[in-house]
Amino acid sequence: MNFNIALVKGDGIGPEIVDSAIRVLDRICEKYHHKAIYTDLPAGGNAIDIYGEPLPRSTVEAALKSDSVLLGAVGGPKWDTLPGMKRPERALLGLRKSLELYANIRPVRLFDALKERCPLRDAGAFDIVIVRELTGGIYFGKSGRLQGSNGIEAFDTEQYSYTEIERIGRVAFDYAMKRRKKVTSIDKANVLESSRLWREVMHELSAKYPEVEYCDMLVDNAAMQLVRNPMQFDVIVASNLFGDILSDEASQLTGSIGMLPSASLGKTRRGLYEPIHGSAPDIAGKGIANPIATILSVAMMLSYSFDLDKEAKKIEDAVTAVLNKGCFTGDIGGKLTDREMTDAILEKIG
């Protein structure tokens, strides 16, 4: 199989971790007789420096022509003083919107080898999938500033349609049917009208999936329950804002945010795959970034966009074997560089 991959390496450690992931994908292609063709695309801070905007139209057009997109990370303090619509992070939001990627899949798993790195005492094995809505909610609602009676006021609007909620709910319920058949829907229905609609739609969907155990949970309680007993969760479905926050919280239970991959999916097979962590400019160029989240994102790409489950599992098994061997980067208690970690994974792939 041949596939065209758009590479958005981004800023900070982005280029380093994407390069590591490419090495792994190239080895898989060689082993299983596939061919990956790469196109580098500017986005984020580097695009601002060159083009004066975070997401050039040419990047969007090239991404739309690709089979899938692999993204590193965008942003950094260099661009923190720019207006909101000109910041590097708008590139990521814009790509998701342009590619019509409304569902973000974030697996949160505690590897056996990293149990001692989990901040929870006596943590049991947990395996959670957070399904986050990506193209609606407060990140895409009306926002701005105005002059009020008490000075400058700022506002951001949370808004969801029935259709937006229903389609992300279906993703969560369908995913649960392939797992342990349990969905927890996160909202703030005791306060927010958008959350009350969210809850109504999820209840309608729940009736259509009688095999799936369903419950509602207020977001503040969910934040508490994640650190109290993460084993209770199977599939969590949440709005853009709530899913963003809870998945970052959950990432810390795995030992490091550098362990978590993600997939952003829509109506077509084309997806956007990325680690959930940021650009970490403070360690950029030092060779110490953890490449595992990006490498596991490639595994998700092979499975979700190309139906290459065997190849994806080969990567996942190699990562597990390397961790079981005690090969760790600095963020998970070891001393390996990003290249050494990648070399160890390549050795296990064979």
Image (spheres, helix red, strand yellow):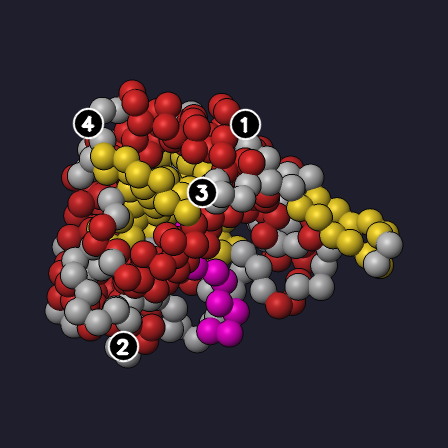
* Quarter holding residue 211: top left
N-terminal label among 3 and 4: 3
Three-letter amino acid code at the position of disc 3: Asp
N-terminal label among 2 and 3: 3
Which residue is at 30% across, 31% downward? 173
The reply to whether dot 2 and dot 3 touch (C-beta < 8 Å) is: no
Three-letter amino acid code at the position of disc 1: Ser
Residue designated by label 2? 333
Furthest-top residue in this view: 208
Q: Is residue 58 above or below residue 327?
A: above
Specify whether 299 is left or right of 32. right
Three-letter amino acid code at the position of disc 4: Glu
Let me know if residue 277 is in the magenta part: yes
Which residue is at 45% across, 42% downward? 187
Magenta region, residue range:
274-283
Residue designated by label 4? 211
Three-letter amino acid code at the position of disc 2: Gly
N-terminal label among 2 and 4: 4
Q: Quadrant of the N terminus?
A: top left
Let me know if residue 255 is in the magenta part: no
Q: Is residue 300 visible?
A: no
The reply to whether dot 2 and dot 1 touch (C-beta < 8 Å) is: no
Gap between marks 4 and 1, in whole Å?
26 Å
Between residue 250 and residue 54, name the one nearer to us: 250
Residue designated by label 1? 161
Looking at the rendered structure, the secondary structure element under dot 3 is: strand
